[in-house]
């Protein structure tokens, strides 16, 4: 009888068919370069990348706004100005579909959380103190996240001053009274 045959006369096919196991899993690598980087979950990485891309696109939107401002002063720029305006409006629609909203701050109280004051103008009316007069650069949000603060000109009434911290001696005198 053959070595590979069974007692019932059939051959043992398992001995003839050899198989091999190939491990295709990535091996654990202890690389010090990767350990020093801060790793975020993939969702967070995607959101950070998306927000950075949107910030770059806002620069293009600013360029289109500047072109429209310059073109409005030129009588010969009619057709070109309307084309640039259409492109700007289309870009705004795309940004809005992604959740980007422009901040409309003119006439509202200055809030340093959403705007940075680039200039201050004195006003004669106390009610106009800390009111935003104009924007030199629009601010934008993505949902509740501030993508870019607005750059604004703020009114300031000369009679109002920001509260100054009292000196240590003045505080003791006020407490003693």
Image (cartoon, rainbow, N blue to C red):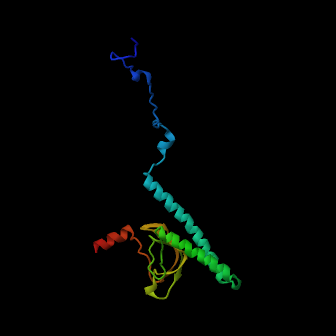
Q: Nearer the viewer, residue 176 or 22?
A: 22
- Tell me residue 13's x, y (percent): 40, 23
Q: Nearer the viewer, residue 123 or 53?
A: 53
Q: Residue at x 52, y 70 (%)?
A: 94
Q: Residue at x 45, y 33 (%)?
A: 23
Q: Residue at x 64, y 76 (%)?
A: 67
Quadrant housing residue 84: bottom right
- Residue located farthest toward the bottom when viewing the structure as drawn: 124
Quadrant housing residue 68: bottom right
- Residue located farthest toward the top when viewing the structure as drawn: 1
Q: Residue at x 49, y 39 (%)?
A: 32
Q: Nearer the viewer, residue 107 or 94?
A: 94
Specify the quadrant that holds the C terminus. Answer: bottom left
- Tell me residue 133's x, y (percent): 51, 82
Q: Is residue 67 above or below residue 168?
A: below
Left or right: 77 in relation to 104: right
- Tell me residue 139's x, y (percent): 50, 72
- Residue located farthest toward the front when viewing the structure as drawn: 9
- Tell me residue 34's x, y (percent): 49, 43
């Amino acid at each position: 009888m053959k070595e590979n045959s069974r007692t019932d006369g059939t051959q043992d096919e398992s001995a003839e068919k050899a198989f091999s196991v190939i491990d295709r899993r990535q091996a654990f690598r202890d690389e010090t370069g990767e350990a020093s980087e801060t790793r975020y979950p993939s969702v967070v990485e995607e959101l950070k990348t998306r927000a950075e891309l949107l910030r770059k696109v806002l620069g293009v939107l600013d360029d289109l706004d500047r072109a429209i401002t310059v073109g409005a002063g030129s009588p010969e720029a009619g057709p070109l100005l309307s084309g640039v305006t259409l492109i700007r409006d289309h870009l705004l629609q795309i940004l809005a579909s992604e959740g980007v909203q422009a901040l409309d701050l003119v006439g509202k109280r200055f809030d340093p959380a959403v705007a940075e004051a680039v200039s201050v103008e004195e006003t004669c009316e106390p009610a106009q103190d800390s009111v935003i007069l104009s924007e030199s650069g629009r601010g934008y949000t993505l949902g509740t996240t501030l993508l870019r603060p607005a750059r604004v000109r703020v009114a300031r009434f000369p009679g109002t001053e920001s509260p100054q911290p009292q000196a240590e001696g003045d505080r003791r005198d006020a407490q003693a009274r």
